[in-house]
Amino acid sequence: MILGNAFMMFLHTVQSRYDEIVIGMIEHLLLSFTSIFIALLISLPLGIIVSRKRKIADFVIGITAVFQTIPSLALFGFLIPIFGTGNVTAIIALTIYALLPILRNTYAGIVGVDEAVIEAGKGMGMTNQQILTKIELPLSLPFIMAGVRTATVLTVGVATLATFVGAGGLGELIYRGLASWNNQLVLAGAIPAALLAIFFDLI
């Protein structure tokens, strides 16, 4: 009975806040997708570079790992005096969090390619560019995609905190629910965020 009443209250909240939920999801999608896209543009080339210059690999990956250890709210707070509030601050913070999984997996995937396969490519007269595009990247793709999946789920989750810098998203519903002790409103923001993470992961 109690669960039934709670479920009905949740449905009522979703119906009454439908427009806000849709807007929050769109904002959430834009923040997450933009951040992942920028992280890919940075991490993939950087992963290729450090796989060629392995002496600096630990240093570069270590820097991104340090950023990963900074608490989410603290990172948003550090960026506000520089970039102000809004989407720019949120996207920069989310991009920073997405860098490590993609970079680390790109590096691990490329350096893990069997040397015998690379030597065979060289023996066939392939250039370094051809070895990269036709051997190393295709063989390391499962590792790279695993990193992208990890980064995506992480980004969608952390994006709920973007509301604290005025960037909107589903976190705004969650925050309002927490502030008013409204569990149904919290769920109205949290459940769509979880579904988005699952949706991105499946893609």
Image (spheres, rainbow, N blue to C red):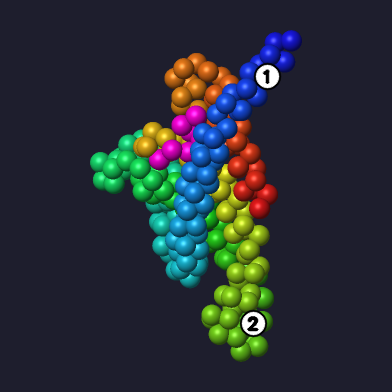
The segment highlighted magenta reads 167-173
Badge 1 marks a residue whose secondary structure is helix
Q: Residue at x 48, y 33 (%)?
A: 171
Where does residue 177 sit, x and y in percent of width and height? 50, 22
Reading the image, the residue beneath label 2 is 121
Kindly give the residue lying farthest to the top in the view shown.
1
Work out whether 101 lies above or below 182.
below
Left or right of residue 32: residue 81: left
Label 2 crowd bin: few (<14), some (14–19), many (20+), radius 10 Å? some
* Residue at position x 58%, y 66% in the image: 110
Q: Is disc 2 placed on a helix, strand or loop?
A: helix
Q: Residue furthest left?
A: 81
Given residues 39 and 63, the one toward you in this image is 39
Task: Write down the quadrant of residue 153 in the picture.
Answer: top right
Percent of width and height locating residue 21: 55, 34
Q: Which residue is mark 1?
A: 8
Q: Point out the tag, 1 or 2, that comes first from the N-terminus.
A: 1
Residue 100 appears anywhere in the view? no
Could you tell me which residue is drawn at 37 percent across and 37 percent down? 166
How far across and down, in percent of the image, does residue 16 sit?
Answer: 57, 26
